[in-house]
């Protein structure tokens, strides 16, 4: 009888763990290229990490040909939208700016945003990916966070 009860407990805990992971929301933000990076595409994925931190995974297909490799991409979260955001970023995500580059897969970055996932989703923010100062400090991609997210 103890074996059956223990097995039932293990199964119940396992199902609880699976449902906790399955209920975790993951959202995508399309990143639109700017005139400095025309023809490229990008996407960001937001995943809750804790009650005060969100994981931001970025993928971009490429950067301007004049960009030094490895590309150093600077990432910012601004209040507002891509069309009209504040002068200063709400969050600078530039502790690490180097990227992983693969000719076939593009460029990937992973960042931690020091704000809760639900706060990012419910407030109007713009995610901006910018080239390094030595590469012109140009906005390369922008995507609107909040209200424009697509659930995976």
Image (tube, rainbow, N blue to C red):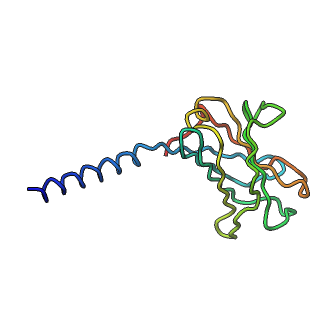
Count how many numbered circles sit on residues in the image: 0
Quadrant showing the N terminus: bottom left
At 80% from the left edge and 31% from the top edge, which residue is drawn? Answer: 86
- Vertical side of 44 occupied by 66: above or below: below
Image side of residue 121 versus residue 99, left or right: left
Q: Residue at x 55, y 34 (%)?
A: 118
Q: Position of residue 80 (x, y in %)?
A: 73, 30
Q: Residue furthest front?
A: 2
The picture places residue 69, in percent across and down from the top left corner, at 81, 67
As displayed, is residue 142 above or below residue 123?
below
Q: Is residue 93 toward the left or the right of residue 105 in the image?
A: right
Q: In front here: 14 or 56?
A: 14
Query: In this orientation, which residue lies closer to the viewer: 134 or 40?
Result: 134
Residue with the most extreme left position: 1
Could you say which quadrant of the image residue 121 lies in?
A: top right
Percent position of residue 96, x then y: 74, 57
Residue drawn 49% across and 46% down?
152
Q: Is residue 49 left or right of residue 16?
A: right
Quarter occupied by residue 3 = bottom left
Q: From this viewpoint, which residue is outermost toward the bottom?
A: 103
Identified at 78% across, 37% down, the residue is 89
Examine the rendered structure and indicate whether residue 127 appears above or below residue 18. above
Residue 117 in the image, given as x and y percentages of width and height: 57, 38
């Amino acid at each position: 009888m103890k074996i059956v009860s223990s097995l039932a407990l293990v199964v119940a805990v396992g199902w609880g763990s699976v449902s906790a992971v399955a209920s975790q929301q993951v959202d995508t933000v399309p990143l639109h290229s700017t005139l400095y990076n025309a023809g490229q595409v990008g996407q960001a994925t937001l995943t809750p990490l804790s009650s005060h931190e969100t994981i931001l995974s970025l993928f971009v297909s490429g950067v301007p040909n004049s960009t030094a490799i490895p590309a150093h991409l600077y990432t910012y979260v601004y209040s507002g939208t891509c069309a009209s955001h504040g002068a200063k970023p709400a969050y600078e995500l530039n502790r690490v700016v180097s990227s992983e580059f693969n000719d076939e897969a593009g460029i990937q970055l992973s960042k931690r945003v020091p704000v809760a996932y639900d706060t990012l989703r419910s407030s109007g923010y713009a995610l901006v990916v910018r080239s390094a100062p030595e590469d012109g400090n140009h906005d390369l991609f922008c995507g609107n966070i909040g209200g424009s997210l697509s659930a995976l």
